[in-house]
Image (cartoon, rainbow, N blue to C red):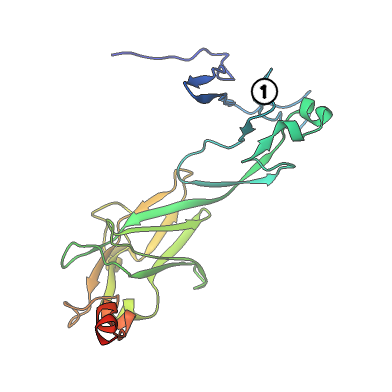
Amino acid sequence: MIFILPGPAQTVLPVQPQIVRGVRPRWVSASFRSIRQFLDFRRQEAPSHALFTGLPLDPIYTLATDVPQAWLVRPREAPHDLDNIQLYAIPPKDRASGIHAVFGLDYLVIEGHARDTLTSAPPRGLQLQLTTNTSTVIADTQVVANLGYLQFRAKPGVFQLEIRPGRGREVFTMESAGNSGWDSPSVDEVGSEITLTSFDGLILYPRMARVPGMEKEDVLPPPDAVEGPSGPSIVDRVSSW
């Protein structure tokens, strides 16, 4: 067994260009702190920074955040296009002061995998929604065929998971919201509440039961009903010509 213990004073990862034949070097650095730091006993928090020296001006650089998968982060303040930083186009005075950006955490991701209790297959096309205690819809999504995947974006809180009005309610009822894992209690026992209380996000495993008489029905219309009647094929038109 190997234990890797970082140094107690390590705050900035060392910069090492990655060189590949025929490809320009890549300069990668990260900045992180284990605790918050402040400037001169004031309430202003010391900003995180990564220092590069001697960078060539020609390449296009990128400033981004490496955050948990459940975080939806975007830049709030940035004087430059952070995906296309061109140092040669920045005045020397501004270049010496560095590239500054403020990022904000907008939402957390709620994801999950829904299943049909009759067939154990994904209820593809089923539309779901998150509502508040006042029945206000804050997010909606559609279950896809690939593993019954679903995804919402939301802020921490307590919500109700529901089937959206429409064809989905004609075919399915919600047996469990899946807030407590694969074998979550049923809606009759604990209701359809889900709780987003962690910065790690939330994974749901909703179970859907079919309405009696809808055992062979599908939420999505058959392909021919969507495409409608088609005109003569290319072969038919060439033959007639």
Q: Is residue 102 above or below residue 122?
A: above
Left or right side of 93 for 211: left
Q: Residue at x 48, y 15 (%)?
A: 6
Left or right side of 161 for 41: right
Query: Split into 4 quadrants, where in the image is the C terminus?
Result: bottom left
In front of the other: 177 or 107: 107
Q: Is residue 25 above or below residue 5?
A: below
In front of the other: 164 or 55: 55
Rendered location of residue 225, percent (x, y)? 29, 83
Q: Residue at x 25, y 53 (%)?
A: 182
Number of other residues with Cα within 10 Å of mark 1, as a class: few under 14, some 14 to 19, many 20 or more: few
Rendered location of residue 59, percent (x, y)? 63, 30
Is label 1 in a helix, a strand or a loop? loop
Q: Quadrant of residue 99?
A: top right
Q: Is residue 219 above or below residue 145?
A: below
Q: Is residue 163 above or below residue 23?
A: below
Q: Residue at x 67, y 23 (%)?
A: 56
* Circle count: 1
Q: Residue at x 40, y 74 (%)?
A: 164
Query: Split into 4 quadrants, where in the image is the N terminus?
Result: top left
Rendered location of residue 75, percent (x, y)? 64, 45
Residue that protrudes farthest toward the front in the picture: 241
Rendered location of residue 222, percent (x, y)? 26, 78
Q: Quadrant of residue 104?
A: top right
Left or right side of 149 for 89: right
Which residue in the protein does label 1 denote?
Answer: 56
Q: Amino acid at mark 1?
A: Pro
In front of the other: 66 or 58: 58
